[in-house]
Image: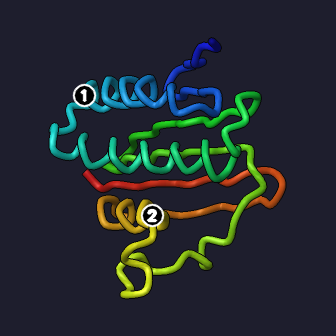
Amino acid sequence: MKKPTIIENTIKIPSSQEYLPDVDSFLEGILRGYGIEESLIADIAISVTEMVNNGIIHGNKSDINKEVAVSILYKNSVLEITIIDQGEGFNPNGIENPIDDRNLLREVGRGIFIVNSLMDDVRFDVQYSKGTRVILSKHL
């Protein structure tokens, strides 16, 4: 089993869901170190886990030879978390609304909707064939 790589405020994991607890521990440890309240840590952790999971499954297609990186920056009362996969990219505007009647029973499509409700800003930087960068921001 490969090990996550941690350098300062960045963790890189192989594309397997078994590494999600490592990301969660890394994230929560840093956020607690910043003195962020537990309820916000929970919202942020849910958001990051969802985006990392998307990077693993949809971006990197669970290819253990590809990585997902998570970086944390806290500056001027703004927390910015960047998640980068090594996948083919996607069109974020092509995601259907999961609360539309015709999508309510679908098993996919809710993650980005949830993240948008928990974070103050969600941006996608898609570089086709080079991966997707998701930037989550929270004003604290």
Quarter holding the N terminus?
Answer: top right
Q: Does residue 22 appear to the left or right of 82 in the view shown?
A: left
**Most distant residue in the front direction:** 105
Nearest the viewer among 77 and 99 is 99
**Most distant residue in the bottom direction:** 101
- For the point 59% across and 63% down, the residue is 124
Q: Residues within 10 Å of mark 2 (few under 14, many from 20)?
A: few
Mark 2 lies on residue? 107
Q: Residues within 10 Å of mark 1 (few under 14, many from 20)?
A: few
The image shows residue 79 at horizontal and vertical percentages of 37, 46
Circle on res. 32: 1
- For the point 68% across and 33% down, the residue is 67
Q: Does residue 77 appear to the left or right of 85 in the view shown?
A: left
The image shows residue 64 at horizontal and vertical percentages of 70, 29
Q: Is residue 2 above or below residue 108?
A: above
Colour scheme used in the picture? rainbow
- For the point 24% across and 28% down, the residue is 32
Q: Amino acid at mark 2?
A: Glu
Q: CA distance from mark 2 to mark 1?
A: 33 Å
